[in-house]
Amino acid sequence: MFKSKWKKVGEIKVGDKIAVVRPSADIEKTDLLGVSSKVDFEEIVSIKKVGREKVWDIEVEGTHNFVGNGILAHNTYINGKLTANSDSIDADALLFSVQNTGTNVFNVDAEGDYSYAGTGSSIAADYAEYFLTKDTDLQAGEAVCIDILNPNSVSRCRGIADPNIMGIVSTKPALVGNAKPEFIGNKNYVVIAMLGQIPAKVSNENGEIRIGDSLTASSTPGYVMKANAGDSTVGVALENMRVAPEGTDSTSGNIGTGTVQVMISRRNKSLTVEAVEEKVTERIANMQIEDEVSRLVASAVSALTPQNTLTLDENGNVILASDPNQIIDILANNAELRGITDSLLTLQSDYESLKASLNSKVSDIKSSIAGSVFEKEYIAGERLSSRSIVSFDGKKAITATSASRDNIIGVVSSVDVDLETVTVSARGRVFVTVTNENGEVKKGDPITVSTSQGGLGSKAITEGMMVGYALSDAEYSGSDQSEVEIAISLAWYQGSGSNLAFDSSVLDLSGVSELASLKVEKDSVLYGNLNVIGDSRFTNLSTTGNLNVGLMALSSDDNSINVAGDVLKLQNEYGAGNIEAFGGKIVITNTGDIKVLGEITASKYNVDISDVAGASAGKALVVAGQKEITVETNALTLDSLIFVTVEDSTSSFTYEVLHGDGAGDGAGATSEKVAIRIYTETPVEKDTTVNWWIVN
């Protein structure tokens, strides 16, 4: 091994030795990068300066680095960062390139865009992007959902089959997008895998996970589980996940957890019952029961050996695969044939058994499809009870009210207090409690949530979401509530614009063009909307809700009058009179005057002094050496009270009215200009401000 000391070019002198490459040299040395090279050393016999010429070596100023063109690299390395800078204002200007036989194969322009002619590769496997998150403790492999409360953000998935599931925290991405400098290393931003293969945290709470299973959010925050039909999914399992042995660290109660490789594949699909039935029937009819039959065939074939496997020759003879020359007599009583036929009979028996079982299950589905209850589990946002109508607030199930009517998701069928979850029926026959606030519920009536009691039902009479139809008449028996069975049918109810109901009967007015005389013997209730084209006249009009006139609303909820996006105008037409309140105790005249019999209390009193000629208050400046100032204003009347105060002065000021006692305009004020003379006995020593105020 040679011992050497690095020198800069400026320190080299005649007599020093320099390393050169010798293809035939027998001296071996390991360079700084650990690569073996054949080198030799020659003595420098002379050093001379030469003019500028084109060379193919890299020469870095201030260092002793050389590389290329057959010259041995003398300590050529970069300790730090390499920066290639361009002063070009053209974003597409080439900044750096790599060539092969004169052709650019890798390019970087001045804006940072790059292109290459080859194939990029990485030992990592997924494409990911940076996202904002409030969950700063997210770990690689955890499932994340869109944060519906914060824009452009994600959060750890916490609900079963959360429809907002969108990705998995990346472990080591091959390519990262949205990687702004301020995002990198920021705990509030997390890299989420969007495409490719990724390790994911999984749970077996919905059954063991097999290769090819779609995965959705589980009840364990951040973990995914096997998805059911209609669930939103984030990926497909590339590995099997079995139930962990009882008592190991990867189990919690009856739920096992682990990590499997997943292919990111987001899907949001909702299957109807009819679609599931049709698909199962089609598979059975076409014998397309791939998974189970494939496993069955694989098990049977594994029991066969080359010695008892049959095949056919070109003449149609059955032969042994182990001996193509030995023709098998189908009727012969030999061990090989008996073993094969036994295996085939077993396979046929297993297949027939599986077929019969599946046909039986399909038959059961068909026979009970009309009465089946389709359920889904939700996290409870509050304490809920069975038979309650519930809505979805974006994260949890809550008691349905008139405010959340448009988000009704079904009826609670069961409650798990320990897990704080509820099972909600979205189809089928269930019992609910209904009120008679919109009239007694009759068979066939549409049912929605009560406006007076959350979670209960009532007859739907206005447009909005309904939960189903009554299957029988409700029996109230003197109460305002009753139990009634309904057929759940989540749909938008359009309301009724043509049916007039009297007690329990309905008068159908559809198609009627004229009503010459309509006599009503007792109180009547109109269910639905009443549309009148033309003028309407009422002797008295009472409403229990709000009255809307264009953009103006008279609200009975808070006894208010409101105009959406505009100004509320009172007595705005020409010739309008005064506005009176409280029996004339407060009067606003049509000239803008306000008269109040009581007291006026205000935290601040502002007087407009922009119109000096008509101002009733203001400031005046008495210049140093002077002793008076005259203020002109037409706000004075014969009965005016005048107040004068001085700022930051010991001088005492008084006033007098110079003129302004002419004829009035009917309201007490004179039509000609008036003036106030504000003065002191001796000249002021400095500029002094006086305040004046006129009260009529």
Image: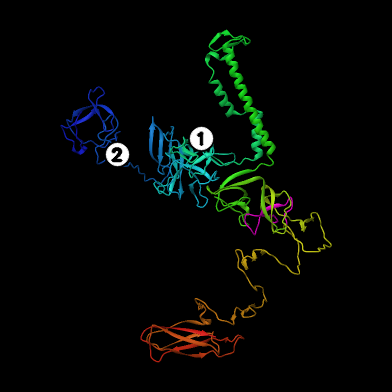
Mark 2 closeness class: few <14, some 14–19, many ≥20 residues within 10 Å = few
Residue placed most toward the observer, 676 or 14: 676
Q: Position of residue 147 (x, y in %)?
A: 51, 49
**Residue 249 falls left or right of residue 453:** left
Badge 1 marks a residue whose secondary structure is strand
Q: Position of residue 372 (x, y in %)?
A: 66, 41
Quarter of the picture containing the C terminus is bottom right
For mark 2, what is the residue? 78
Query: For residue 449: magenta?
Result: yes
Residue 237, numbered label: 1
* Visible residue check, residue 463: no
**Residue 556 falls left or right of residue 394:** right
- What residue sits 68% from the left and 39% below the top? 369
The colour scheme is rainbow
Mark 1 closeness class: few <14, some 14–19, many ≥20 residues within 10 Å = many
> What span is colored magenta in the figure?
440-464
Q: Which numbered disc flags the more N-terminal residue, 1 or 2?
A: 2
Query: For residue 254: magenta?
Result: no
Badge 2 marks a residue whose secondary structure is loop
* Visible residue check, residue 406: yes
* Foreground label between 1 and 2: 1
Residue placed most toward the observer, 448 or 67: 448
- What residue sits 67% from the left and 29% below the top? 285
Q: Position of residue 93 (x, y in %)?
A: 41, 42
Residue placed most toward the observer, 363 or 261: 363
What amino acid type should be assigned to the residue bearing mark 2?
Ile
